[in-house]
Image: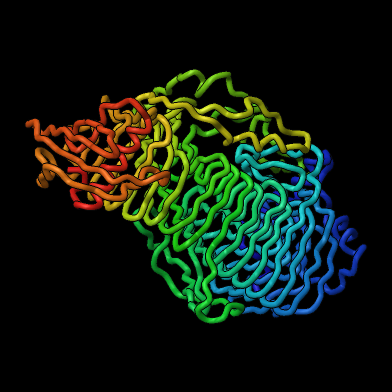
Amino acid sequence: MKKTLTLLLALAMVFSLATAAFASGEASKSMDELIALQNETDGSALTPIVTTSFTGTTLAYPRYARFVNQDASGEIVDPIAWHNGAVYSEPGTYSVSNASFEMNTDADGSTTNDFSGLGAAVLATGKGVTVEISNSNIETTGVAKLALFTDNGAVSIVRNSTLTSNSGTIYDGYVSTADQTMMVAPPWVLGLGGPLCNARTTNIMGNYSTAAYIDSTFNAGGWGALSTDSGTNMHMVVINTTVNVEDSGYAAYTIGDSTEDYYGVTENVSTYANIMTGGVATYQSYVGGTDIDLVQFNGETDEYGHGQGGDVVATVSSGALVPGKVVKSVINAEEFGFMCHANGATGYNIVNLLDGTEVNTGDAIFLVKKINSIFNVDNAVLNSGTGVLLQLIDNDDDYVGLDFSATWGMDNGYGHTYGSHMPTFNSTFHEEAGYSNAFAVNTTDVAKNWTSELNLTNTAVEGDIWNSTGYVGSNPATTLTVNLGEGAELTGVISAGAFSHTTKDAKVGEGDWSEASVLGHVTNIVNSNGKNLVNVALSGNAVWNVKGDSVIDSLTVGGVAKVVVPAGVTLTVGDKTYTGTTIAAEGAASGEASGESSGEPTDELASSVHIPNVDVRGAFTLDVDVTFEDQGNGVKTYAIDFDGHHLEGTINMGVWTVSSEDSAEQDISTAVQTAYEAMTGAGGK
């Protein structure tokens, strides 16, 4: 059996223990002191794990577990913060079955670390290590006290079990930081903070680490339930599983170009369904009896840097569902669905919502803080409490900034200083009055823009899409592309905009980070700054019902798709404006509404036609007679007669425009156009 865990594991453990001494202003505890604390409980059944050195100075901190590289079962009760329940580091397949781990401690983050697994109930580390947890209950209490830690290429599989992490109280003097050697709560600039926001249930780290969670429940007091962190091409598969996050926190975190596949999951979370900082997350339904391959990636990647190719380490399926039973994925988030805030310069965050997935949020479904992202939505149900489908803003981090005034470290009492030499986050947020700082546009070249893309098919949704970037900080703006394909109907605004936070000030610290929740919550106004570009394309039978004034840079309409602009609403495309009309596929100059063809229509309008039962906004139906006259140069006039009423208008480049300013008559004209196209297949020609 190995005498030590990985060097990274050991170093992170030392840092975590050093944090305790810094927090209290005392030298870190000696070996004798820690063993004395341990012996206050029954330490006779424990096995020591790590004795190591750091920077030439020998530090003999104890690390103990009840089970070491052996199968585990039965009941474990252990109140000591830094103890592990079971540690697996030698290659092999291990079982934790019919077990009860009760590791409810007073951990304050000074002797635990969920980036190294110090204090985790179950820890699996190393290539060739597989741990299978089944029919078990694992509960931890305390700051940074994990239920399950998977690291350094290990594989963890959880079936029919409940894993719970209850939060604790962080030690006095803790400062919000992104330094993993010191971090025991999420950085508040993520918009996370609260009295319970300091314990994750699971964490996957290291290159190619892999996990599957099946027929199980994961509960987190706050911070996060299913996390990935430092590493590359990690893989997580979740099947027929429920995730609950009580306080400020996320159901999942995606980082390091990892891949997360969710089948028939239910998530009830306070803040985010998923925070994306580089990777791909796919949510879809699960059919009972379906086998899913759990692949451990091997370094081969796709064009975005995400893992592809590798070894199938297990084939997993639900044992709780009868064959053929369909369970869709349902996400309930009190604030946001998916927040993207970081990735590599050429990498992308990709979210796929498929196959009946339902997302219900208090605010935006998708929140992007100036970064590359792709959202693919097919046959999904999306409900936003604020009516915002996709919100792009400048990163809140630029408002908060970093504190470089002091390093964060300590003298460990052995003649060496440990701790973080990274800056910490400032403790205040302030935004000036007005929208996007009164249109103070940043100076970054538009050619360096980030890109975001929304692809919508087979989904009807009501919600607004705002690109309100390019104002604050030195980062580039974002170029947004919206593609509405077959079966898509979007009712809402799509526009360049400027944003304003709904709350302009926040202060955190001294153990209270609850005001972090103001970040990300904004309102918008229409505004193009020349950098927040928006390109919209419709194909197939897609429909965009423009609900409010919108400004975009280009519009492409193909197939039998259409853009319906009601009276009183203005759509600006480049230097052209539309109101009270329907835009269908037809040729046009660049920067205007454009289609797949150009010049004269290939389909001739009939000279007259009778159309029965024209549905006018679902309010009433009409029988109408429509007469067309060719005026030359691609311009035609039309007349609509019904029940003694007469309306006239023009058709120019496929755009129907009624001469009346009466909104009811404009609605009738739009309904007649729609009925004519449906009857003749003319596509507005």
Which residue reaches farthest front?
Answer: 644
- State the image coordinates of residue 213 (x, y, percent, origin top left): 59, 69
Number of numbered discs visible in the structure rendering: 0
Quarter holding residue 2? bottom right
Q: Does residue 585 sit above or below 146 in this rendering?
A: above
Colour scheme shown: rainbow
The quarter of the image holding the N terminus is bottom right
Q: Residue at x 63, y 64 (%)?
A: 242
Quarter holding residue 64? bottom right
Q: Does residue 343 sit above or below 524 in this rendering?
A: below
Q: Does residue 621 sit above or below 515 in this rendering?
A: below
Which residue reaches farthest left?
Answer: 632
Q: Residue at x 29, y 34 (%)?
A: 581
Q: In this rendering, would 294 be left or right of 64?
A: left
Which residue reaches farthest right?
Answer: 40
- State the image coordinates of residue 8 (x, y, percent, origin top left): 61, 57
Q: In this rendering, would 103 be left or right of 55?
A: right
Residue closer to the observer: 591 or 84: 591
- State the image coordinates of residue 525 (x, y, percent, origin top left): 47, 26
- State the image coordinates of residue 658 (x, y, percent, origin top left): 26, 31
Q: Does residue 316 sit above or below 243 in this rendering?
A: below
Q: Residue at x 57, y 51 (%)?
A: 360
Q: In this rendering, would 247 be left or right of 264?
A: right
Q: Is residue 532 in view from this perspective?
A: no
The quarter of the image holding the C terminus is top left
Residue closer to the observer: 161 or 41: 161
Q: Residue at x 57, y 76 (%)?
A: 318
Q: Is residue 205 in view from this perspective?
A: yes
Q: In this rendering, would 277 be left or right of 101?
A: left
